[in-house]
Amino acid sequence: MRLRGRKNNFRETLELQQDLVVLEPQQLKGRWREFFGNDNPIHIECGMGKGQFISRMSGNNPHINYIGMDIYDELLIRGSEKARALWKNEKGVNEVPNLALARGNVEFLDKMFDPGELERIYLNFSDPWPKSKHGKRRLTHPRFLMKYKQALNEIGEIHFKTDSLSLFEFSLNSFSAIEYQMRNISLDLHRNGIRDDLVLTEYETKFVGQGMPIYRLEAVIGEKIQQEHRRLVAEDLEEQFRRGTMKDPESEDE
Ligand SMILES: C[S@@+](CC[C@H](N)C(=O)[O-])C[C@H]1O[C@@H](n2cnc3c(N)ncnc32)[C@H](O)[C@@H]1O
């Protein structure tokens, strides 16, 4: 996603916004809590585009620190304009204390975050790279999933949304190859109307407007959340047996 027709002074504009914009995220490796000034959990959107999702999330959830990451300076500019316009404090000053917009390539995530420094990763409408020779560039390729696992903490999760059926199929295979547990899988997220409990991204707004289905899943990665997930699944199965809604495979009844 590139923006056209803007003056070429992006870098200067970004350098003036050190409260919000991080141009060298590798310098904050292991020190993101210092940037935010608290110990709140950190959630990141890898490939934030123009930043609608991440700026709304940061306003809705002041006790979570958010990072929107993208490769392009132009998108960081758009993201910063959006975030400051959305969130003004009581004095009318545009400040967003729980948001950082980082210029970075997800390829180098391990250079920007210590192991366990992140709690959640959002992958929203990642580029599908449809040609199989480009498969390794897809942000749900197993080589990226390994990087995410390293950066996530014991309750770490990945939330993934896309309009691309082929990317979703590829991703299901990727997640299961690494033996990540998946839950809340949907093949048409907004089939019963727009989900008002979820924040939409720019791409999502456009695709939903065109009547396209949105595919979504959550992957549970951290040890602690995996245990919790297994416990809930086991409890749910037990409840189904108890109510007689599922046949017990151990039973000898025909
Ligand atoms: C299709 S756009 C989606 C934007 C936004 N998440 C949304 O849903 O509206 C994908 C974005 O991912 C960014 N991107 C692609 N590969 C990336 C990488 N390796 N590291 C960081 N950003 C990346 C692109 O620059 C682009 O802005």
Image: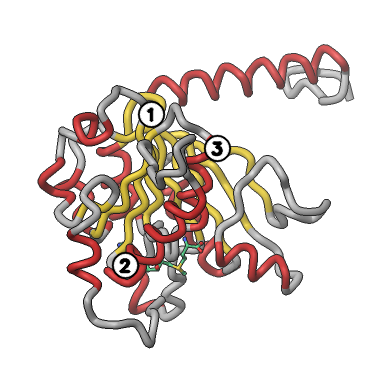
Based on the displayed image, in which of its 4 quarters is residue 114 positioned? Answer: top left
Q: Report crowding for label 1: few under 14, some 14 to 19, many 20 or more residues within 10 A (C-alpha).
A: many
Distance (Cα) linking label 2 and label 1: 24 Å
Write the residue at 54% across / 24% down. 229
Report whether 165 appears left or right of 245: left
Q: Position of residue 66 (x, y in %)?
A: 38, 41
The residue type indicated by label 1 comes to Gly
Q: Which residue is mark 2?
A: 136
Residue farthest to the front, as pictured: 91
Name the N-terminal-most of marks 3 and 1.
3
Nearest to N terminus: mark 2 or mark 1: 2
The residue identified by callout 3 is 60
Q: Which mark is residue 222?
A: 1
Q: Is residue 203 above or below residue 192?
A: below
Q: Which sits in the foreground, 74 or 111?
A: 74
Which residue is drawn at the image coordinates 44% and 52% (left, top)? 83
Instruction: Find numbered disc 1 in the image and state the secondary structure of the residue it sits on.
Output: loop
Question: How would you rate the neighbour count of disc 3 (Cα within 10 Å): few for under 14, some for 14-19, many for 20 or more?
Answer: few
Instruction: Identify the secondary structure beneath mark 2.
Output: helix
Seen from the viewer's position, the closer of residues 33 and 171 is 33
Q: Please identify the residue farthest to the left as the structure is shown.
A: 27
